[in-house]
Amino acid sequence: MPIRPPKHRPRYVDAPAGRCVYDASRDSAAVRGYDRQWQRFRRGILAERPLCQDCAASDRVIAATDVHHVRKLRDRPDLRLDPDNVMALCSSCHDARTARGE
C-alpha cells in the first residue's frame, strides 16, 4: 500500500511569535539602509566578486548571491557603502555568518 509523503510545513507558520509576526514589525528595507543606492552598490560588488569568498577559501567554487557587512551596519552606518567592509557570500555562508552574530 503506498504511503503519502509528509507535507512540508515551515515551523514558523504555526508558532505564535513566528516569522510572520517578526516581518510585520520590521521597518522597510529602505529605512534599514538598503535603499536604491545600496542596491546599485550591491550589484557592483557581486559583479566585481562573483564567487563566495568563504567557499573560495575552502577551495569550493560557488556563486556569490549576498553581500555581507564585516562590521555591522547597526554599529558603523558610515561604512555602509565601503567596499572594504563587505564580503560577497553565497546564501548558506551568509546565513551561517549572520546566525553567529557576525
Image (cartoon, rainbow, N blue to C red):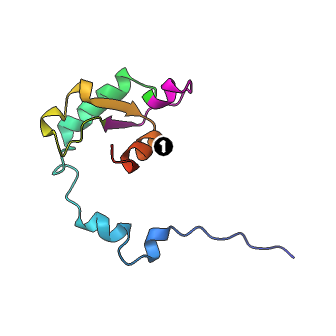
Q: Identify the image quadrant of residue 71.
A: top left
Residue 17 screen position, x and y as percent: 35, 74
Task: Give the side of residue 85 with respect to residue 92, left or right.
Answer: left
As shown in the figure, which amino acid type bears the numbered disc 1? Answer: Ser
Q: Residue furthest right?
A: 1
Q: Which residue lies furthest to the top in this view?
A: 48
Image quadrant occupied by the N terminus: bottom right
Residue at the image position 37 percent from the left and 66 percent from the top: 19
Boundaries of the magenta span: 54-68
Depth check, front residue: 29 or 57: 57
Q: Does the magenta stretch include residue 58?
A: yes
Q: Identify the image quadrant of residue 94.
A: top left
Q: Is residue 71 magenta?
A: no
Q: Which residue lies under the disc numbered 1? A: 92
Residue at the image position 36 percent from the left and 24 percent from the top: 47
Mark 1 secondary-structure assignment = helix
Task: Give the side of residue 84 with respect to residue 65, left or right.
Answer: left
Residue at the image position 30 percent from the left and 26 percent from the top: 44
Q: Identify the image quadrant of residue 21.
A: bottom left
Residue at the image position 44 percent from the left and 69 percent from the top: 12
Q: Dot 1: within a 10 Å radius of its alpha carbon, few (fewer than 14), some, or many (20 or more) residues?
A: some
Image quadrant occupied by the C terminus: top left
Residue 96 screen position, x and y as percent: 44, 45
Depth check, front residue: 30 or 62: 62
